[in-house]
Amino acid sequence: MLKALLTRFRQGHRTMAYPDAPQPLPARFRGLPVIEPARCGDGCRACAAACPYGCISASGSLTLDMGTCLFCADCVAACPHDAISFSATDACLASRTREGLTVTAGEEYHAAVALEGELLRLFGRSLKLREVSAGGCNACEADTNVLSTIGWDLGRFGIQFVASPRHADGMFVTGPVSENMREALLATYAAIPEPKLVIVAGACAINGGPFKDHAEVHNGADGFVPVDLYIPGCPPSPLTILDGLLRLVGRVK
Amino acid sequence: MSFGMKTFYNGTSFKRSDIPVPDNDTFFQGVLDAITAGWRVCSYFGVPTADGATLYCVMSARAGSGILGIAATTVGRTFPSLASLCPQLHLFEREIAEQCLTRPEGHPWFKPVRFQKPLCEGKGFWSETDGGGLTPAVMDFYRVEGDEVHEVAVGPVHAGIIEPGHFRFQCHGEEVFHLEIALGFQHRGIERALIGGPTPRTVHEMETIAGDTTVGHGQAYCMNMESLGGVFASPRAETVRGIALELERLANHTGDLGAIAGDVGYLPTASFCGRIRGDFLNMTALLCGSRFGRGLLRPGGIGYDCDAALVDELHKRLQAAREDLAGAVGLLWDSPSVMARLEDVGIVTAADAREIGLVGPAARACGLNRDVRRDHPFGIFRISQIPVITATTCDVAARTLLRWLEAERSLDFIDEQVQHLPRGTYRNQMKEIAPERCAVALTEGWRGEICHVALTDDRGRFERYKIVDPSFHNWNGLGLALRNQQISDFPLCNKSFNLSYCGYDL
Ligand code: SF4
């Protein structure tokens, strides 16, 4: 017992300050894409050609679809002009709409806004979520799980992952929606009482991720259930997930 | 061996025409004889042909020689099942049936593996839905009959934030007679997508076969690409890969030690380890920006170099994490109530473990002395060895203790490597991969042996790329561990194995 207390003392207080203070990120972190069209060479399409998932469109202004992006930086390596990079400090990426995930060269990115009216009143101070992994590789799942550890302590915001859809206010989906999980996903959604939210986390759940266009998956949850929040990344950093959830419930603006 | 397997070392490639293709009798008898002589099956898979399949068997010799062997045989719409004689083959044979539409005659347990569509045209062996697919977990489960016997079905969706799978318990009161596990919910068609590869997407699929084993699978893929392309990774790259592999092991072992503590209601260790696991993930992020090592391993070397400041920082964090972890885990051994809950629960005997072909910590906890890092050394482990640890009690306590002892060795290893990081290039230019060759790569992921086999066609594309995640060998171990246990022991036993659903489902 004494040893447990002593260890407790040594381990100290470790819950992060976020959102009251910024959360440090690793120097090589790949967050918000930054495109600087002024640097682009004439007619250069190197980044678009290099992206294995077709996230970058060069017709008109250069755009990058974060919903499909794996943040692999293959495009950064391909760009001869250093015109594309990923912010090492900005992890606020979530969006309320699918189109909102597109980053356009020269335009500021607007992360998700809060729920409105009755939904905000209902869920703003207490949001219970049921997680469904529908073909996820266990990275999104692991970095969602981490939010419940003492370092992140999601519970202090009234947000909690619960064991049954009957206890939930919404569904949190990871994975590309494998055909073999389609039915279970829909059954879970149906079992959640109205009104309910859907949050999709990770490139897979948004648009198929690394498994995009495989016959065995459905390129994400869109089209099966109405989505209220999209959290991009492969996997999204826990900070991106937390920030997205806090924006949804109006705790971060 | 009598049937003349082609023998080779881990991480090498050879001409496909070097693989002997004996007649069926010689092949199947040869596989049986080899297993009797102490060889073990790493991979056994089919490549569909017009009227059947070519079956390839990759085996590993007893520890000590470092030798691997491969042989093949051509079969029609049926082939003899060896599963009753060699239980370690039973899932492989079911997988061959599901993927290649050839039936293992006499298979004692003939059911789908992933409820997937075959890799070739044609109708599978199990009744299909209107859409032409199979419904996952709809199959004949093993049943125990009797007035006082009841069945408990759990999943696919579970209570926590974990992947889906279906568990069927045959119970007598609280006691479990039998547990059968039906997976396939996470099937994403990775092996089908790899046919005709590699493409620019391939490396990303490799990193997400099992997202918590990005480095383990990434290493195997890089080894295959390098041996097929005739490219070497530099000593510097191999060292960083080794560090990343051990960080991956540390993160997961730490997480599981915490989860085991949580399942027995010992919260101090559970909450400390939950956080310390993150410290290890953040060390991987220090190397490459991703907590799971995405982008770190690339054919030809590594995607990111490390400078002196980074290495210093890594070293510093490692020391701190070692102290924290030792303190957090040490509490377990000093708490009699915790130990009493772990001991004698979920036993898999050494004999059973050997028969079903367990790998990794699950096998070492039963006293089986096997570890790819020593038995078939690859990368940095050819130069720098990590002592292999085994336990003898075969229970949850053994699997828990083993995780901690392995974590200690990984800490020592990284500590040594960061202080002697070789100089030189970190990435060599990849070349086109060679046609008509076979490459085999084994690595020791944190769950155990990972095996990747690449067969290239005449244009240097993958005709078949076969992946075996350690979980494919080990899920049956969890089933056996539950025999005659209380059903309430399930979460604890499950955590002590912590197997991958997606790694199995592919
Ligand atoms: S980082 Fe995103 S946009 Fe760039 S190549 Fe990778 S997937 Fe494509």
Image (tube, grey):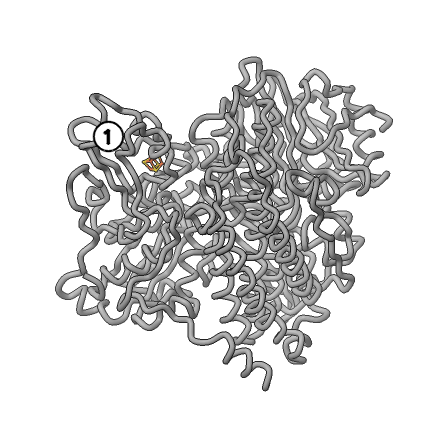
**Residue A184 drawn above or below residue A242:** above
State the residue in front, B88 or B390.
B390
Residue A138 visible in the displayed image: no
In the picture as drawn, the residue positioned furthest to the bottom comes out as A2
State the residue in front, A32 or B462.
A32
Task: Name the residue that disc number 1 marks.
Answer: A57
Mark 1 CB within 8 Å of ligand 1: no
In the picture as drawn, the residue positioned furthest to the top comes out as B458
In the picture as drawn, the residue positioned furthest to the left comes out as A117
Q: Ligand 1, what quadrant?
A: top left
Q: Secondary structure at mark 1?
A: strand
State the residue in front, B499 or A40.
A40
Q: Residue at x 75, y 42 (%)?
A: B375
Q: Is residue B8 left or right of residue A115?
A: right
Residue B474 visible in the displayed image: yes
**Residue B219 drawn above or below residue A22:** above
**Residue A91 drawn above or below residue A150:** above
Q: Is residue A139 left or right of residue B359?
A: left
Q: Residue at x 63, y 55 (%)?
A: B410
State the residue in front, B186 or A239.
A239
The mark tally for this picture is 1
Q: Residue at x 25, y 53 (%)?
A: A229
Give the letter of the chain under mark 1.
A
Q: Residue at x 68, y 55 (%)?
A: B362
* Quarter the N terminus of chain B occupies: top right
Q: Residue B400, how many percent across, how many down?
A: 65, 64
Q: Residue B295, how many percent across, how many down?
A: 45, 40
Q: Residue B330, how many percent across, how many down?
A: 63, 73
**Residue B105 drawn above or below residue A96:** above
- Callout 1 crowding tier (Cα within 10 Å): few <14, some 14–19, many ≥20: some
Q: Residue B447, how many percent across, how many down?
A: 62, 51
Look at label 1 and name its amino acid: Ser
